[in-house]
Amino acid sequence: MSTEIALLVGLKLSGRNARSKASLISAEESLEELAVLAATAGASVADRSIQTRARADAATLIGSGKVDELKTQVHFHDASVVVFDQELTPTQQRNLERALDVKVLDRTQLILDIFARRARTREGQLQVELAQLNYLLPRLTGHGAAMSRLGGGIGTRGPGETKLETDRRRIHQRIQAIEHGLERVRGGRTTQRQQRQVVPLATLALVGYTNAGKSTLFNRLTGAGVLADAKMFATLDPTVRHIVLPSKRHVLVSDTVGFIRNLPITLIRAFRATLEEVVESELLLHVVDASSPAAEEQTAHVLTTLNEIGAGETPQILVLNKIDLVPGKPDTAALARRILGDPEHQPAGAVAISAATGEGFEELLQKIDQTLAVDPLAECAFRFPVGEGAPLHILHEHARVLATRYDDEYCYVDAVAPASIRRRLRRYAVRP
């Protein structure tokens, strides 16, 4: 399949509608990120433009004058797709496709397309299809040229045109079937997690902005052969491996999908089963590309996403990766303070490393060991369903049980347990 020629379009709001520069990535930086996304999806970016307006145009987002200018660029570059950095409404997308007479995508559709290309396992493919259908469902009526596109290209991977042309009832049925399938996957993942917890091991998860170097670090930590390249979202399907710390303790490490600014909510919901590996972890290795000019903004977006999925309170080590690309010999503490920006989000520690060269690797292992060594005891109470013996067994093996009582449905236990066990059993907790 030949490479598609793409034009990129951004919108910069001026005046009262402009957001705080301190809290938002600039339109230029955002469009640069969109260019990387487009290249990852297999497009060749011919040109890019930013429209400055006081407010978004309801009909076309960028206004009729800019649309006419864009149409000239489409003909000049013989472009086959125009990608907008903002999410388009169904009406805007329909109007733009009619005016430009080419395929029109927005940022969300582009990310969904990359996920469709990257998904390897059946679980990943189902998650992507679910996200695509949920996103496209409200756009089916009068969707225009996008519904009649034939052939391949970015924006057409995933569930396929024939599914999208069926009526809403059949699409709802497909969505329900996928959700049931993912629930079974979630149940299987929970079973695997419980089996791992029979011999409790501390669990770590690598998180961070896409392309921060998580998979390269994961491979160096574990010796795994996880795909690691310079393109965004190289890793979709979670991989779990064990490593041995300097103290000789064994811990489990999982690599996870990278986060990104404006990660579609449909994807966050669809990848719930995958993100559970993050939520259930006892320590997060928050990997940051320290050489990126947008490191502070990217870190803020990751922290926001962690809060959204319920992992905002989990201890973190800030891993300042790609330190070999930072000029001079940077001060780790000063660099961490600059990247974090918000003192309320201080991690358990910060370590400067290069996953590519191995610099700082031993210091990172020591920091993990020191952080996991803190496992304070506290009194707590649990309520276990009578039929679930595994969590009760974990509590007896790794905590001091003070009292046990039963009724027809539950077993109630008072205990003194370490923090790691309390986190593992938190869904059974009556009081923390």
Image: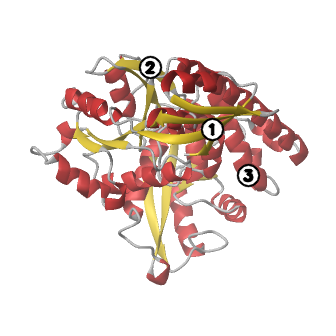
- Dot 3 or dot 2: first in sequence order is 3
Foreground: 373 or 97?
Answer: 373
- Dot 2 or dot 1: first in sequence order is 2
**Is residue 22 left or right of 314 when viewed as pictured?**
left
| Residue type beneath disc 3 | Ala
| Residue type beneath disc 2 | Arg
Q: Is residue 10 above or below residue 332?
A: below
- Dot 3 or dot 1: first in sequence order is 3
Per the image, the residue denoted by label 2 is 241
Q: Secondary structure at mark 3?
A: helix
Image colouring:
secondary structure
Check whether the beta carbons of the residues at disc 3 and disc 1 lie within 8 A of each other.
Answer: no
Q: Secondary structure at mark 1?
A: strand
The answer for how far apart the CA atoms under marks 3 and 2 are is 46 Å
Residue shown at the point (59%, 69%) measured from the top left: 61
Marks 2 and 1: which is nearer the front?
A: 1
Per the image, the residue denoted by label 1 is 382
Residue shown at the point (26%, 45%) measured from the top left: 290
Per the image, the residue denoted by label 3 is 145
Residue that sits furthest to the left in the current view: 328
Residue 223, image x, y percentages: 35, 16
Residue 413, image x, y percentages: 63, 34
